[in-house]
Image: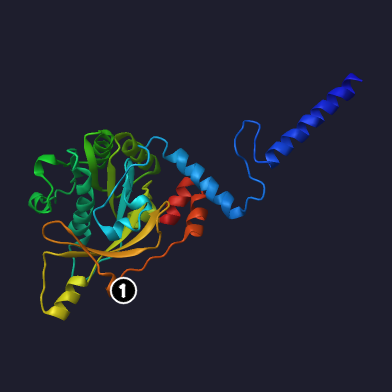
Amino acid sequence: MVNEASESMIAGRGVERVAGRAAGVSAAGGFVAGVGESRLDRVSRLSREIRTLETAGRPGGVRISSGSVGMDGCLPGGGYAKGSMLELVHGGMSHRRGMFCGMGLMGLGVRIAKEWISDGRYLVILDRDRQFYAPGVAAMGVPLERLIVLQPSSESDAIWGMDQALRNGAAGAVVAWVHRLEDRVARRLQLATEHGGGLGVLLRDFHSSRTSPSWADVQWRVRGSDRTADDHASRRVLDWQKRWYDMELTRAIGGRVGSRVRLGIDASGEWIEESRESGASHEQKSSLHLAAQLAQPARSRREMAS
C-alpha cells in the first residue's frame, strides 16, 4: 500500500511539472515556452535573453548620438550605447583615394568618438604605426588637451593599453587599429568597455574582420566614396578638404541591418548629410534575419555578421 501511494504521488507530481512547463512556467519559476508561442516569437525571446546576459555589466539604456541624422537613423535607439564597441571595417577603396584605408577610416572613427568627450572625458588613440596627425584631429574640433595618444611598440602592449584605457571611466572613447584579435582578447576588450562605460572604436581591414571577428555591438562596412569626383564632374570644383564615406550597417542588434548611408566630413569636422533626393540612401530592415542570427552561439553569430 505504501509503495502504491508513493508511486501515485510521484506520478502526480510528474504530471504537475509537465503541465507547468506547458503553461510556460518551469519548476524554478522561469519562463520556458508560452502556450501558442510561434517559432519566430521564441527565437526573438531567446535573442533578447541572450542579449540581456551579454550586456549585464553595461550602463543601462544610455545612448549617445553620432551627430549624424543619417547614421543615427540606422542605429537602435538613435545612437551608440554607453559601454559598447563599434567596429569600422575598411571594405574597399576608390583608386582615387589611396590613403582612405589609413587616414580616412581613422578620421571617421575620431569624428564619431568626438561626441563622447563633450562631458570633459578624454579621447584615447592607439597609434602603433606612428601615423597619427594631431593638427588634422585639432581641425576637426577635438581639443588637444582632451587627447591622449599611445604608441605601443608591440601587439601585446597595444592590447594592454586598450584594455586599460577602456576600463578607465575618464576615457570617453578609445580608437585603435586592430588586426589579429583572438576570441579571448576580443571578449576581454568588450568587458573592459562595459566596465568603463565609454565607446570602443575598432578600425579593421576586411580580411582581419573575417578571420578574427570581434565582439562589437555595431559594425559598419566603409568604403571611400567617389562623391568628390562626382562633384568635380558636375560643378568643375574639386574640394579635397571634404571626405565622403559609403557605409553599410552589417551588424547592429535591434538596428536596421543592411541599411546604407553616404556621409561626408568637412574640413572643420562637421557631418555633411547626403540629400535624400539623391536616391543614394537605401534602407533595408530584416528583423527575421536578425532574430535568427542572434539565436546562434556567440562566435558563430559574430562570424556571420562579419
Q: In this view, does 292 lie to the left or right of 91?
A: right
Q: Quadrant of the C terminus?
A: bottom left
Q: Quadrant of the N terminus?
A: top right
Position in image of residue 204 (x %, y %): 29, 53
Q: Which residue is drawn at 65% across and 37% down?
A: 25
Residue 49 vs residue 168, the one in the foreground: 49
Position above or below: 187 against 302:
above
Position in image of residue 59 (x %, y %): 35, 37
SS at mark 1 in the image: loop
* Residue at numbered disc 1: 279
> Can residue 152 be seen in this snapshot?
no
Position above or below: 86 against 20:
below
Residue 175 vs residue 80, the one in the foreground: 80
> Can residue 134 be seen in this snapshot?
yes
Q: In this view, does 256 lie to the left or right of 126?
A: right
Q: In which image quadrant can residue 97 be found?
A: bottom left
Figure coloring: rainbow
Q: Which amino acid does label 1 sit on?
A: Gly
Q: Residue at x 57, y 54 (%)?
A: 40
